[in-house]
Image (cartoon, rainbow, N blue to C red):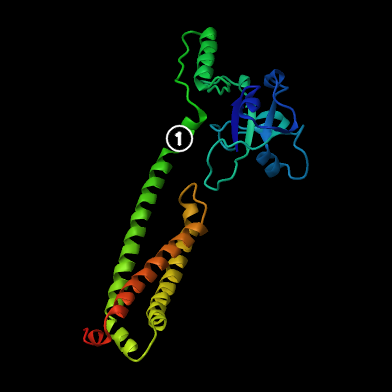
């Protein structure tokens, strides 16, 4: 559970609809009548049997000892809002949040979230003017959009994700090239067999299917083993990397299609060349 200190219009700015109760007011910051708003995740976790509106909860100072109940801050739940992503959890779920008025404490720093139809520059300039009107000596950090903040927070995942995608593409290219080369060489070594089949009166389609059947069988065995291993890794990966969602079925199907196509082309081209060779010459091939 996390406690987020907000202003009275925070939910209007971020666009979070109110599910039950009311939003925070100036009276909720007064001692003895303090009120908080919880998100939907908090309400489902701790108040499954009924509505949390009007229930009192105790908020403990995270710096206090675990058994220190004297520092508990009792407050009343006055509203429930929809879930807002405040931080990324390994499970990908929303964390339970308690929203309290920032006036109830003395914050050392504050982040201002503003929305303006004139764009982020105008909103940042207006917020800076309002802060300087209160105290000209207050330090103000440069304004950033929410997208910029998310990009800055997630750049390690984006970097490693791009690297993994590049490595996966290279591995896919190497696997396709290797499969094509090995299959093409193996089929070309069967030139004498193809000549014998043609000399005995086998048709072109029968010869091609005889060659392709062996290739398809080998591909089926390799794809079954590879898909099982990839599925096992994809099942374990979300527990180690944030943002991974398990097995990607379209990716598995795409890789299988590319490898099957490479194997069939690699077997078809040498077989087609061998079929065009005179059977007497093919029988002389080593």
Q: Quadrant of the N terminus?
A: top right
At x 71%, y 19%, the residue is: 27
Give the left or right position of residue 266, taking residue 37 as reference: left
Q: Position of residue 245 (x, y in %)?
A: 52, 52
Give the left or right position of residue 172, taking residue 42 as reference: left
Query: In the rendered image of this protein, does residue 177 appear above or below residue 201?
Result: above
Q: Residue tagged by mark 1?
A: 151
Q: Secondary structure at mark 1?
A: helix
Within-10-Å neighbours for mark 1: few <14, some 14–19, many 20+: few
Q: Position of residue 61 (x, y in %)?
A: 58, 31
Q: Is residue 247 visible?
A: no
At x 47%, y 55%, the residue is: 237
Question: In terms of image quadrants, where is residue 142?
Answer: top left
Query: In the rendered image of this protein, does residue 178 appear above or below residue 135?
Result: below
At x 58%, y 21%, the residue is: 117
Q: Position of residue 278 (x, y in %)?
A: 26, 83
At x 45%, y 38%, the residue is: 154
């Amino acid at each position: 559970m996390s406690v987020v200190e907000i202003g009275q219009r925070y939910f209007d700015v971020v666009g979070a609809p109110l599910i039950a109760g009311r939003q925070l007011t100036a009276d909720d910051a007064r001692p003895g009548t303090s009120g908080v708003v919880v998100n939907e995740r908090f309400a489902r976790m701790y108040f499954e049997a009924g509505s949390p509106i009007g229930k009192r909860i105790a908020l403990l100072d995270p710096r206090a000892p675990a058994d220190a109940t004297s520092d508990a801050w009792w407050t009343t739940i006055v509203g429930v809002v929809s879930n807002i992503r405040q931080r990324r959890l390994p499970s990908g779920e929303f964390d339970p949040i308690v929203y309290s008025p920032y006036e109830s404490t003395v914050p050392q720093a504050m982040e201002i979230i503003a929305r303006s139809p004139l764009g982020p520059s105008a909103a940042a300039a207006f917020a800076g003017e309002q802060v300087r009107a209160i105290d000209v000596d207050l330090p103000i950090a440069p304004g950033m959009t929410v997208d910029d903040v998310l990009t800055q927070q997630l750049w390690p995942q984006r970097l490693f994700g791009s690297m993994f995608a590049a490595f996966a593409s290279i591995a896919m290219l190497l696997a396709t090239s290797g499969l094509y080369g090995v299959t093409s060489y193996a089929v070309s070594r069967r030139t004498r067999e193809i000549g014998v089949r043609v000399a005995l009166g086998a048709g072109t389609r029968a010869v091609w299917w005889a060659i392709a059947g062996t290739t398809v069988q080998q591909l089926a065995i390799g794809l079954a083993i590879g898909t099982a291993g990839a599925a096992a890794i994809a099942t374990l990966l979300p527990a180690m990397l944030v943002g991974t969602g398990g097995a990607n079925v379209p990716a598995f199907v795409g890789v299988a299609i590319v490898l099957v196509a490479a194997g069939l082309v690699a077997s078809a081209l040498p077989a087609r060349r061998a079929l065009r060779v005179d059977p007497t010459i093919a029988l002389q091939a080593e």
